[in-house]
Image (cartoon, rainbow, N blue to C red):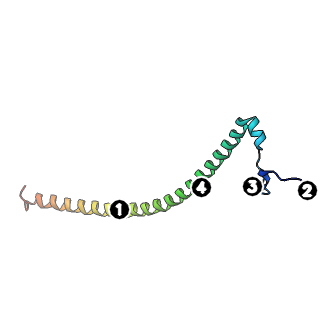
Amino acid sequence: MAPKKSAVDSVAGAVKPPISFKEFSKDPVKGLMFICIIAVGYLYVDIKMSNEKNVGKQDVTIERLEAKVDTLQTQVVRLVGEASALNSKIQVLESLNKIPQ
């Protein structure tokens, strides 16, 4: 005669829970601690995976922003050069009394 299956065996199938109901009822603190450890482990893995996704997105954004900063820096350098050239022209014209002060 085959051994009789319990309700836990029929529900869980081939996978047995790490703690039985009898053990849980005798010491529920150990069972709850086991559940808490599993939950904390899951949350840790979930946070790590979401952080990796965010880092990838931020790397792309940083590269785009660095390209924009480089473009703006070249424009600033060009405009500063033009401004200094115009300033020197104004000073020359003022010294020749071509522009009233």
The answer to the question of whether label 4 and label 1 lie on touching residues, with beta carbons closer than 8 A, is no
* Mark before the other along the chain sequence, 4 or 1: 4
| Residue occupied by mark 1 | 72
Tell me the distance, in whole angstroms, between the alpha carbons under discs 2 and 4: 46 Å
Q: Please identify, in this view, whether the residue under mark 4 or under mark 1 is nearer the observer.
A: 4
User: Which kind of residue does numbered mark 2 sit on?
Assistant: Ala
Tell me the distance, in whole angstroms, between the alpha carbons under discs 3 and 2: 18 Å
* Mark before the other along the chain sequence, 1 or 3: 3
| Residue occupied by mark 3 | 11
Q: Residues within 10 Å of mark 4 (few under 14, many from 20)?
A: few
Residue in front for this viewpoint, 42 or 85 = 42
Residue drawn at x 77%, y 51% as measured from the top left: 7
User: Which kind of residue does numbered mark 3 sit on?
Assistant: Val
* Mark before the other along the chain sequence, 3 or 2: 2
Tell me the distance, in whole angstroms, between the alpha carbons under discs 1 and 3: 65 Å
* Mark before the other along the chain sequence, 2 or 4: 2
User: Which kind of residue does numbered mark 1 sit on?
Assistant: Leu
Q: Residues within 10 Å of mark 2 (few under 14, many from 20)?
A: few
The image quarter in which residue 52 lies: bottom right
Residue drawn at x 44%, y 63% as measured from the top left: 64
User: Which kind of residue does numbered mark 4 sit on?
Assistant: Met
| Residue occupied by mark 2 | 2
| Residue occupied by mark 4 | 49
Q: Is residue 27 left or right of residue 68?
A: right
Q: Position of residue 101 (x, y in %)?
A: 7, 55
Tag 3 secondary structure: helix
